[in-house]
Amino acid sequence: GDSVTQTEGQVALSEEDFLTIHCNYSASGYPTLFWYVQYPGEGPQLLFRASRDKEKGSSRGFEATYDKGTTSFHLRKASVQESDSAVYYCALSDPGNYKYVFGAGTRLKVIA
Amino acid sequence: AQTIHQWPVAEIKAVGSPLSLGCTIKGKSSPNLYWYWQATGGTLQQLFYSITVGQVESVVQLNLSASRPKDDQFILSTEKLLLSHSGFYLCAWSLGAQDTQYFGPGTRLLVL
């Protein structure tokens, strides 16, 4: 079955540090890929999505590029802020169906 | 603008008791609807999806059932709660397959 692997369970950074959260996926088709962010006590909200190879998604300074060759969609931000502290989820959805698979999540803590 | 409402906000229930959680979407006609479960500190597990009134598909078996009695309403229920049902239940909607999902505020359930 489809799967999403996020390597980092927790990341602790100082403000203005560079962020990378790794996301690799396994899917039978050509999935759409998503990054969601979840704040405590709330539902996840979309950061951005990408549907084609080499497509770059971006929002609020975060970005990721769909790489079909390496089956990856790594999240990056050049300079994190304390307000970026949250849990980040990589997710996928396969073509033609309504099933979504989420990664385990990465808890980001940014210290001022 | 679309709004998604979940009820109740939180529940404390006894093992073996019944449960009914609700979700309503306003401002969007014929959305695809989803139920997710999230253990404390865990990832999002899709439970059910529905693309039309009266039709619900199960994604994973957790001794729960779902129904869609109206276009804008999605219900999650069980006749007998287990300790393992504790967690955060999220309702979401999307326009189509592989589309962005928009999540509700969630219902926190504690089973004792």
Image: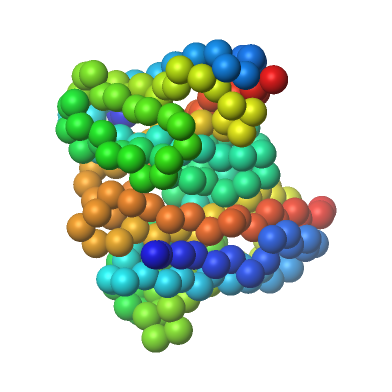
Q: Residue at x 28, y 71 (%)?
A: A29
Q: Where is residue B104 in the image (x, y as percent from the top left)?
A: 45, 31
User: Between A64 and B17, which is closer to the camera in this rendering?
Assistant: B17
The percent coordinates of residue A37 (x first, y second) are: 55, 49
Q: In the image, what residue occupies the spot 73% across and 68% down?
A: A17
Q: Tell me, what colour scheme is on the image?
A: rainbow
Q: Where is residue A20 drawn, in percent x and y? A: 63, 71
Which quadrant: the N terminus of chain A?
bottom left
Figure check: A51 above or below B51: below
Q: Is residue A5 shown above or below B97?
A: below
Q: Looking at this view, is A25 or B78 the one in front?
A: B78
User: Residue A95, percent across and down?
Assistant: 24, 62
Q: Can residue A58 be seen in this view?
A: no
Identify which residue, A3 or B96, lies in the foreground. A3
Count every numbered label the image shows and give the total: 0
Residue at 22 percent of width and 19 percent of height: B70
Q: Report whether B18 appears left or right of B29.
A: right
Q: Quadrant of residue B11?
A: top right
Residue A33 versus residue A69 in the image, above or below: above
Task: Answer with the quarter of the image where residue B86 lies.
Answer: top right
For residue B20, say whether it is visible. yes
Residue at the extreme bottom = A69
Pick whichever, A96 or B48, lies toward us.
B48
Q: Is residue A59 left or right of residue B50?
A: right
Horizontal side of B66 relative to A72 (left or right) equals left
Q: Residue at 55% of width from left, 13% of height from top?
A: B17
